Image (tube, grey):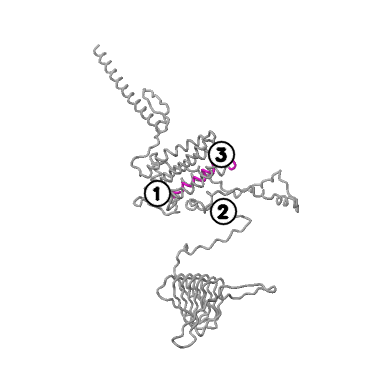
C-alpha cells in the first residue's frame, strides 16, 4: 500500500508540473496574440499537439512587423510620427471614396512610405553624386511608386473620378523633394499648388453632398502640408547625408539585407513585377511564318480615289480629337524630379525616316586630349595646347600648310614662308606670321590676335567673336573677308617714321543697310557718327 501511495504521489506531482508548464505556455501565447493585435496582425487559431501542449500555427510563428527602434535617427522617427497619423487618415479616406481612388491612393501610400528608406539610407551613408548609378538605385523604389500613381491616371482618362486621379498624379511630384537642393520645402509648396487646382474642383463639385470626397481632399492637403513642415524643419537645405557614414553602396546593401530579414527600419517598396522571360532563340533552319491576313472589314482603296483624302480634310478640328493634353507632371522643364531621377528615353528610330544627326558635344564635356605638334608630310598639326607658358615656334617652308585646332591662351610663332594657315575652335590665341603664299582662315574662334610682319594675300574670318589683326607696312594690301563675325578690328601701322606717330585701329563694319530700288537690292555700310 505504501508503494502504491508513493507511486500515486509521484504521478500527481508529475501531472501538476505538466499542468504548470502548459499554463505557462498558454500565457505566453496569449501575450503574443495580444501584442500582435495591437500592431494590426490578427492571430490565427492555435493547434494542440498529441501530448497536450499548445503549439502556435504557421501565421503566429511568422515574425511580426518590427516597430521603429528608439535608437533610430531623429529624422526617421519624425517621419514615422507623421506617417502614422496623417498618412493613415488619408489611406482610410481613399478606401472610403473607393473605385480608382482607392487603387491610386494605395499606390500613393506606397510611394510615400518609400521616402523613409531614402531618408534612412541618407542618415547612414555619404552623399553620392547626383545622377550616379548608386543614387538612382537608392531612389528606385520611390521613382517606381511615383510612376505607379501616374499610370493609374494615364490608363483611366475621361472617368467620373478624373479630378481625383489628376490631383494625386500632380501631387505625387512633391515626393521628389529628396533630389531638390536647396529649398525642397518651397518645391513641395509649388507642386502642391498645382495639385490643389483639381482639389478645388472636387470640393466645388461635391459641395453640400454627404460624401467623403471633400474630407479626402482635405486629408491630402494636410498630409502634404505636414510633409512640407517636416522637410522645412529637418532638410531646409536639401536631403542631409552622413559625411562620416559608410559608402552609399554598402549602406544600400545593409538596408536591403535588413529589410529582407524582417528587421529593417522600413521595408522597401515591392517594386514592379519581374520582367517576362526572354523570347525563344530564332530558328534559322525553319521557314518564316506566313504574313498576317488583311482584315476582312478593311476595304482596299481604289488607286486614284481621292474621296478618302477629302473626307479627312473635311473633318476640320476633329482631326486632333484623339490627341491628349500633356500634364505638367510629364513636362520635364516643369518637373525637376524627372530631370534628376529619370533620363529621357530614346525614341525608336523610324524605318521610313532618317534619324537626325547627333548634336555636337559641348566643349565642357569633351575629354581633355594630349597636346600635339607634329609634321606629317607637308602638313603641320598643332592642337590641344592650353595656357602654355612659352611660345610654340615652327620653322615653316613654302609648301607647308598649318592646322591650329582647340588651342587656348597660347602663343604660336610661324617663322619663314608657309603656304596657308587654318584656325579652328581656338580661344585667346596669339598668332605671329611672317609671310604666307595663300591665306589665313579662321573658323569658330573667340578673342584671338593675328600679327603679320611680312606679306599676306587674304584673311578669311567665319563665325568669329572678337579678333584683332595687326598689319605691317608690307601687308597693307591684305584683303579681309568676314562672315557672321563680331568685334573685328584691324590695326594699321603708323604712317610716318616719327616716334610720335601711333597705330590706328579701324573696326570692320557689322551693320549693313539694304533696300530695293527698280527691282534690285542695294546695300551699304551704316556709318556710326558722333
Query: Is 56 in front, or is 442?
Result: 442
Kind of element beneath mark 1: loop
Q: Which residue is pictured at 72% across the width and 52% down the height?
A: 309
503 up-or-down from 146: above or below? below
Task: Locate residue 84: give its quadrant.
Answer: top left
Placement of the N terminus among the 4 image quadrants: top left
Does label 1 or label 2 sit earlier along the sequence? 1
Residue 260 visible: no
Does label 1 or label 3 sit earlier along the sequence? 3
4 up-or-down from 251: above or below? above
Relative placement, left or right, of 179 versus 349 is: left
Q: Which residue is pictured at 53% across the width and 40% down the height?
A: 203
From the top left corner, tell me how far across and down residue 106 is, in percent: 49, 39
Q: Is residue 75 magenta?
A: no
Residue furthest front as drawn: 530
Q: Which residue is mark 2?
A: 347
Q: Which residues are magenta?
A: 157-178
Does label 2 or label 3 sit earlier along the sequence? 3
Kind of element beneath mark 2: loop
Q: Nearer the viewer, mark 2 or mark 3?
A: 3
463 up-or-down from 309: above or below? below
Predominant SS of the magenta segment: helix
Relative placement, left or right, of 294 versus 60 is: right
Q: Which residue is mark 3?
A: 205
Amino acid at each position: 500500500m505504501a508503494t502504491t501511495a508513493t507511486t500515486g504521489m509521484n504521478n500527481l506531482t508529475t501531472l501538476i508540473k505538466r499542468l504548470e508548464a502548459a499554463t505557462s505556455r498558454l500565457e505566453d501565447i496569449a501575450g503574443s496574440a495580444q501584442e500582435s493585435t495591437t500592431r494590426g496582425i490578427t492571430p490565427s487559431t492555435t493547434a494542440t499537439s498529441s501530448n497536450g501542449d499548445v503549439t502556435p500555427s504557421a501565421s503566429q510563428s511568422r515574425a511580426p512587423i518590427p516597430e521603429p527602434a528608439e535608437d533610430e535617427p531623429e529624422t526617421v522617427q519624425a517621419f514615422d510620427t507623421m506617417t502614422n497619423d496623417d498618412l493613415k487618415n488619408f489611406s482610410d479616406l481613399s478606401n472610403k471614396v473607393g473605385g480608382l481612388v482607392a487603387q491610386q491612393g494605395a499606390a500613393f501610400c506606397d510611394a510615400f512610405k518609400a521616402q523613409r528608406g531614402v531618408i534612412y539610407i541618407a542618415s547612414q551613408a555619404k552623399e553620392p553624386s547626383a545622377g550616379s548609378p548608386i543614387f538612382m538605385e537608392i531612389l528606385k523604389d520611390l521613382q517606381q511608386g511615383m510612376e505607379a500613381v501616374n499610370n493609374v491616371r494615364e490608363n483611366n482618362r475621361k472617368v467620373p473620378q478624373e479630378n481625383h486621379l489628376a490631383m494625386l498624379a500632380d501631387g505625387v511630384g512633391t515626393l521628389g523633394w529628396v533630389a531638390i537642393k536647396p529649398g525642397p520645402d518651397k518645391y513641395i509648396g509649388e507642386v502642391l499648388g498645382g495639385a490643389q487646382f483639381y482639389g478645388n474642383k472636387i470640393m466645388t463639385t461635391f459641395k453640400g453632398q454627404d460624401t467623403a470626397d471633400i474630407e479626402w481632399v482635405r486629408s491630402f492637403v494636410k498630409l502634404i502640408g505636414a510633409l512640407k513642415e517636416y522637410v522645412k524643419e529637418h532638410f531646409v537645405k536639401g536631403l542631409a547625408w552622413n559625411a562620416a557614414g559608410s559608402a552609399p553602396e554598402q549602406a544600400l546593401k545593409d538596408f536591403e539585407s535588413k529589410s529582407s530579414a524582417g528587421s529593417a527600419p522600413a521595408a522597401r517598396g515591392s517594386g514592379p513585377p519581374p520582367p517576362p522571360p526572354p523570347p525563344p532563340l530564332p530558328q534559322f533552319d525553319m521557314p518564316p511564318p506566313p504574313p498576317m491576313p488583311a482584315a476582312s472589314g478593311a476595304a482596299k482603296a481604289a488607286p486614284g480615289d481621292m474621296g478618302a483624302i477629302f473626307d479627312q480634310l473635311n473633318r476640320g478640328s476633329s482631326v486632333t480629337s484623339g490627341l491628349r493634353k500633356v500634364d505638367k507632371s510629364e513636362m520635364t522643364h516643369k518637373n525637376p524630379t524627372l530631370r534628376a531621377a529619370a533620363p529621357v528615353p530614346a525614341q525608336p528610330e523610324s524605318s521610313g525616316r532618317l534619324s537626325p544627326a547627333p548634336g555636337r558635344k559641348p566643349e565642357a564635356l569633351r575629354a581633355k586630349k594630349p597636346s600635339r605638334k607634329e609634321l606629317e608630310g607637308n602638313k603641320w598639326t598643332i592642337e590641344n595646347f592650353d595656357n602654355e607658358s612659352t611660345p610654340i615656334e615652327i620653322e615653316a617652308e613654302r609648301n607647308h600648310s598649318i592646322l591650329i585646332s582647340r588651342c587656348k591662351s597660347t602663343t604660336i610663332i610661324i617663322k619663314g614662308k608657309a603656304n596657308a594657315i587654318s584656325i579652328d575652335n581656338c580661344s585667346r590665341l596669339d598668332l605671329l606670321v611672317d609671310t604666307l603664299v595663300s591665306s589665313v582662315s579662321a573658323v569658330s574662334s573667340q578673342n584671338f590676335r593675328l600679327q603679320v610682319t611680312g606679306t599676306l594675300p587674304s584673311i578669311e574670318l567665319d563665325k568669329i567673336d572678337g579678333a584683332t589683326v595687326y598689319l605691317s607696312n608690307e601687308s597693307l594690301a591684305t584683303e579681309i573677308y568676314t562672315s557672321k563675325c563680331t568685334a573685328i578690328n584691324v590695326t594699321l601701322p603708323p604712317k610716318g617714321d616719327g616716334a610720335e606717330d601711333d597705330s590706328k585701329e579701324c573696326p570692320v563694319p557689322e551693320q549693313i543697310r539694304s533696300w530695293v530700288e527698280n527691282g534690285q537690292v542695294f546695300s551699304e555700310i551704316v556709318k556710326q557718327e558722333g
